Image (cartoon, rainbow, N blue to C red):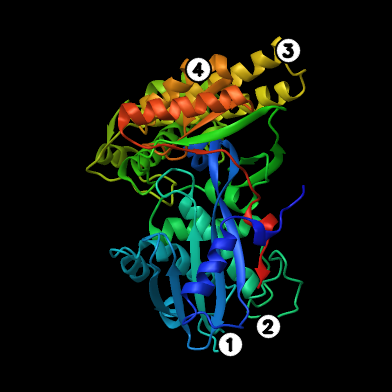
């Protein structure tokens, strides 16, 4: 895999240019700065099933967040957004290192939940995680202050992991800045060992970024977004089994085929209520199934101590689910009724609310069957890649993969209850133009708006059809869509550079 020079990858040149032109009073001229970059990602298949252990297939985009860090001497962390709040006016927030070193989690969450401060929580949260995990002692006098500036081209609320791109770009930069062993581009033990000889790898870095999102920011996401942004391979689909994060060889699409995204421009957020409600409902389904398994074991004279699913709905055979367990899961269930019968779930990111009615059977249906859909999608893509271009067999394999995307989209709406009418329209417009080189489409990520992914040909007629789809969508909804067509390397592959 050939990795482009980090300094040529968008939006690194823009970030460096604006820092030098607009932040000279804060970033000291002539003092070294370290730059990093992490891409957004297109969820091709898997989506929310990451937190129930599914295989996921993710494409790193050419839209990315770039971060630059420079050391300062006053033990202040000055964080500057060049475009998150205002495209033309930098926005600055200061946080004392001591507040991150001694502050508790609830205090931090309150601090960054205030208006205009949420974006900075993704960055300061990375420092908090490095301190909490024992990589960096922020209370040590050896740790100086930091200037941190970022510029991002990852559309906010589009479901392409704008937050993960910020976290991963920041964390990648910080681990290199502090000389943590294993960080990309850092020779072992050549810098001041503030990190107490602990080492870092892509999975640990991604897991800490997920913790920033879950615990500091308060969004109950899985780990898919962070791993994709960190370790995605340019021109391929990152293939990962989320148990919790088993990376498999990248999945390369067949020659002449690509996965692209079209942003509906309907804002999406994994911090939204329905995303967390669906996640909680899926874990409620898991707990009901596990209790039923124990009852069946007891009836057979066996005592079951371990979870046969190893904690993940993705490991449950769909036929067994339909035959043995689904009949015992209520379509809807009040939280207090569930708690009285089953207690809390194993999920660490959500808690069952006694006052809420949950769509338990629907959510469980989605997660058990989505895991199967993703596995079959990968099989059809690999099959198509080995067949002759233009052959009927290849076309059939691609159509089967595409129809699994349609099925996933329908399940997002009817079972996960995370659909959006605008995304339904985009999928319909794509399906209507299948003869122009389209195979399938689906809503992505956390749903409820955001981006639609489509599997399609690389051809002029398909490019023309994409423009027609976007024009017709804008005319029908008044929302101006945008397309995500490019790809780029994950942060771990691109590394960091001192400039």
The disc label shown at residue 462, or none: none
Q: Secondary structure at mark 1?
A: loop
In terms of sequence position, does the residue under pointer 2 or pointer 3 come before the other? 2
The disc label shown at residue 433, or none: 4
In terms of sequence position, does the residue under pointer 1 or pointer 2 come before the other? 1
Residue 128, percent from left and from top: 48, 70
In terms of sequence position, does the residue under pointer 3 or pointer 4 come before the other? 3
In terms of sequence position, does the residue under pointer 3 or pointer 1 come before the other? 1
In terms of sequence position, does the residue under pointer 1 or pointer 4 come before the other? 1
Q: Nearer the viewer, mark 3 or mark 1?
A: 3
Which residue is tagged 3? 391
Near mark 4 (Cα within 10 A), the count class, few <14, some 14-19 or many ≥20, is: some
Q: Secondary structure at mark 4?
A: loop
- Distance from Cα at disc 1 to Cα at disc 2: 9 Å
The disc label shown at residue 142, or none: 1
- Distance from Cα at disc 3 to Cα at disc 1: 64 Å
Which residue is tagged 2? 192
């Amino acid at each position: 895999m050939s990795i482009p020079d980090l300094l040529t990858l968008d939006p690194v040149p823009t970030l460096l240019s604006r820092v030098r032109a607009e932040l000279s009073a804060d970033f000291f001229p002539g003092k070294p700065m370290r730059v990093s970059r992490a891409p957004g990602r297109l969820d091709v298949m898997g989506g929310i099933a990451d937190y129930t252990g599914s295989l996921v297939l993710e494409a790193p985009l050419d839209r990315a967040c770039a971060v630059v860090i420079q050391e300062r001497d006053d033990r202040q962390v000055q964080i500057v957004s060049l475009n998150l709040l205002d495209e033309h006016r930098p926005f600055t927030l200061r946080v004392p290192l001591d507040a991150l070193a001694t502050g508790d989690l609830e205090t931090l969450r309150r601090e960054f939940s205030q208006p205009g401060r949420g974006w900075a929580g993704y960055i300061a949260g990375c420092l908090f995680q490095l301190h909490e995990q024992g990589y960096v002692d922020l209370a040590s006098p050896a740790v100086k202050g930091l200037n941190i500036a970022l510029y991002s081209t990852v559309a906010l609320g589009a479901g392409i992991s704008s937050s993960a791109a910020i976290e991963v770009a920041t964390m990648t930069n910080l681990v290199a800045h502090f000389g943590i062993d294993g960080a990309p581009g850092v020779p072992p033990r050549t810098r001041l060992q503030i990190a107490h000889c602990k080492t870092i790898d892509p999975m640990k870095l991604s897991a800490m970024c997920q913790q920033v999102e879950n615990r500091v920011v308060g969004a109950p996401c899985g780990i898919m977004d962070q791993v994709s942004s960190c370790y995605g391979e340019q021109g391929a689909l990152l293939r990962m089994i989320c148990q919790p994060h088993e990376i498999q060889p990248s999945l390369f699409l067949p020659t002449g085929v690509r996965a692209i995204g079209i942003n509906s421009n309907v804002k999406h957020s994994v911090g939204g209520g329905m995303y967390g409600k669906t996640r909680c409902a899926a874990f409620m389904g898991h707990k009901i199934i596990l209790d039923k398994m124990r009852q069946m074991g007891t009836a057979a004279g066996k005592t079951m101590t371990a979870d046969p699913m190893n904690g993940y709905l993705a490991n449950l055979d769909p036929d067994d689910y339909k035959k043995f367990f689904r009949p015992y899961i209520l379509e809807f269930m009040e939280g207090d009724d569930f708690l009285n019968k089953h207690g809390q779930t194993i999920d660490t990111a959500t808690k069952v609310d006694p006052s809420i009615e949950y769509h338990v059977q629907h959510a469980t249906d989605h997660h058990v069957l989505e895991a199967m859909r993703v596995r079959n999608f990968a099989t059809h893509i690999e099959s198509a890649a080995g067949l002759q271009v233009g052959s009927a067999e290849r076309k059939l394999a691609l159509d089967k993969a595409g129809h699994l995307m349609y099925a996933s989209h329908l399940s997002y709406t009817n079972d996960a209850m995370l659909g959006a009418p605008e995304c339904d329209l985009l999928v319909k417009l794509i399906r209507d133009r299948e003869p122009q080189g389209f195979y399938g489409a689906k809503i992505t990520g956390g749903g409820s708006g955001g981006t639609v992914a489509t599997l399609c040909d690389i051809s002029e007629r398909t490019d023309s059809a994409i423009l027609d789809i976007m024009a017709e969508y804008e005319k029908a909804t008044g929302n101006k869509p945008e397309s995500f067509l490019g790809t780029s390397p994950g942060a771990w592959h691109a590394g960091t550079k001192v400039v």
